[in-house]
DNA sequence: CGTCCGCTTGAATAGTGTCAAGGTGGGTGG
DNA sequence: CCACCCACCTTGACACTATTCAAGCGGACG
């Protein structure tokens, strides 16, 4: 059912890793700025900072007003939505290449809390910088819309796959989703705490634990050597 | 659980109500084009058609590729997502002022089937027209992004409110959502078939019927005289 | 070594789905 | 105008699924 957060202290302060070197970003092809020339970064007003956050750090809170977007270069981030009655649910999980905080472009408060699920590297961009780049390169607009559409597609899957059907099928769909987030080549999943997994699914920790155990017994999910990394086999219901 | 659609014949052909008269549109203030001058509409290449669809008409299908957006002026539209295994779920319900088919702007196939829940009036706009207007009025970009954000916010509520918790609370949240769609002043809901209501919630028709009956017995939901219109009282869990 | 936190498991209970039967109302055709 | 029909809604009984409360386990870390 709906989880009320067990209070665990959030870590907030990132470590500044320097100015982002977009020109030589190894994964620029998947990022927002793919297609920009090196020189385009020469005359932006505000720097793009490269920040490293520890696991369980809050990038921003639900309702905060801010003028910053975060581009995720490494690691995973959850978006958590809290309701008036205190119940909360993870509505999305973002991985490398995703951008969070797009609503800042519309001068709206952040719709969720964004919290790291692992150590992450992010590039922090101000709305002013992005708007400047957009005015110079109008096609960036389409890139931004594409990110919006990716979020929306993910949200729709979260509704129709992760939130519909039996717990068993929902877990399998979620695992497949997380496999994709991980790159998808090997069918391997970077795993998170059971509390988080349950909150993604909108079920109780105990139910997740039980059904997940079944999947392991059946061999559908198997442990790789690595801690908290699992392999998911084939297509199952 | 997941509903497999009972096959009911879809009506598809709209009735052409003439070219849209954006200049004198009574609800332009809530539409995409609020802010445009009358003269801006004088020199667009392709006409904006004003179409009326009967209840249960399909505007477009999931996976179709098209270059048309639909602005809803009157009535309600459901977005239905079907999975490989044939199960389907309503992931959103749109009302007056909403735009559907935004993904066409990115040359992507439609992500859902869009089907009218009532008789509807729509303005059909081609992507070329919108792009033309955008290039003339760059601030329209922000309008478009705002629509994207509204969809995303709605999707997130659909996850955290309509898809989490007990059936009872989910129905109440859905009803409140539909009250807002209806304008929200009076707390009155335009109602849809139980099959659709269940598909919005991801539950069975029977469970919806049972719990909805309880709410009526408790007086939380009461019938107005009008057919399929109900009043929802106060705040309840 | 002991504590804490997260995970697992059990048992009782509440919630939901499924199958099946019956009701209701609006529309149609006689 | 009435009778019938059909689509849709309601209700019951039962099986199954998921939650809750509770106890215990095990690794990480002081």
Image: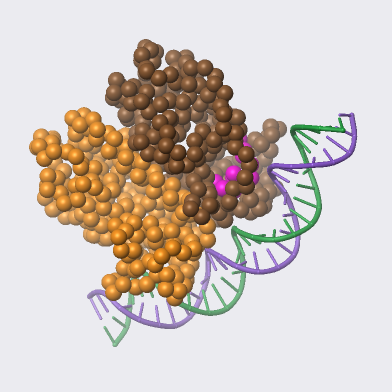
Chain colours: A orange, B brown, C green, D purple
Out of A111 and B64, give the one closest to the viewer. Answer: B64
For residue B142, which quarter of the picture? Answer: top left
What residue is at 19 percent from the left and 39 percent from the top?
A35
What residue is at 38 percent from the left and 12 percent from the top?
B42
B168 displayed left or right of D11: left
A155 displayed left or right of C14: left
The magenta segment is B185-200
B168 displayed left or right of A133: right
For residue A195, which quarter of the picture? Answer: bottom left
Query: Residue C23 appears at what percent x and percent y?
Result: 80, 48
What residue is at 24 percent from the left and 60 percent from the top?
A119
What residue is at 17 percent from the left and 38 percent from the top?
A36
Out of B220 and B38, give the one closest to the viewer. Answer: B38
For residue B37, which quarter of the picture? Answer: top left
Q: Is residue A73 above or below residue A55?
A: above
- Determine if residue B186 is in view: no
- Determine if residue B133 is in view: yes
Asked if the stretch drawn in magenta spans residue B199, the answer is: yes
Q: Is residue B218 above or below residue B183?
A: below
Query: Residue A203 appears at what percent x and percent y?
Result: 48, 61
Total marks shown come to: 0
Query: Residue A167 appears at what percent x and percent y?
Result: 50, 62
Q: Is residue A122 above or below residue B134?
A: below
């Amino acid at each position: 059912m709906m989880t009320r957060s067990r209070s665990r202290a959030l870590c907030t302060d990132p470590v500044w890793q320097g100015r982002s070197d977009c020109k030589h970003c190894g994964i620029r092809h998947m990022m927002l700025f793919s297609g920009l020339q090196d020189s385009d970064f020469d005359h932006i007003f505000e720097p793009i900072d490269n920040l490293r956050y520890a696991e369980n750090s809050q990038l921003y809170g639900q309702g905060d007003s801010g003028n910053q977007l975060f581009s995720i270069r490494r690691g995973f981030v959850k978006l958590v939505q809290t309701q008036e009655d205190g119940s909360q649910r993870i509505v999305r999980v973002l991985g490398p290449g995703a951008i969070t905080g797009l609503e800042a472009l519309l001068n709206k408060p952040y719709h969720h809390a964004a919290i790291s699920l692992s150590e992450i590297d992010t590039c922090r961009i101000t709305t002013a910088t992005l708007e400047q780049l957009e005015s110079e390169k109008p096609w960036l607009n389409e890139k931004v819309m594409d990110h919006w559409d990716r979020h929306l597609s993910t949200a729709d899957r979260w509704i129709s796959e992760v939130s519909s059907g039996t717990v068993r099928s929902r877990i399998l769909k979620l695992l497949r989703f997380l496999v994709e987030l991980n790159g998808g080549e090997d069918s391997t999943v970077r795993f998170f705490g059971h509390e988080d997994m349950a909150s993604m699914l909108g079920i109780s920790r105990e139910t997740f634990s039980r059904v997940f155990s079944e999947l392991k017994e059946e061999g559908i999910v198997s442990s790789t050597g690595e801690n908290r990394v699992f392999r998911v086999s084939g297509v199952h219901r």
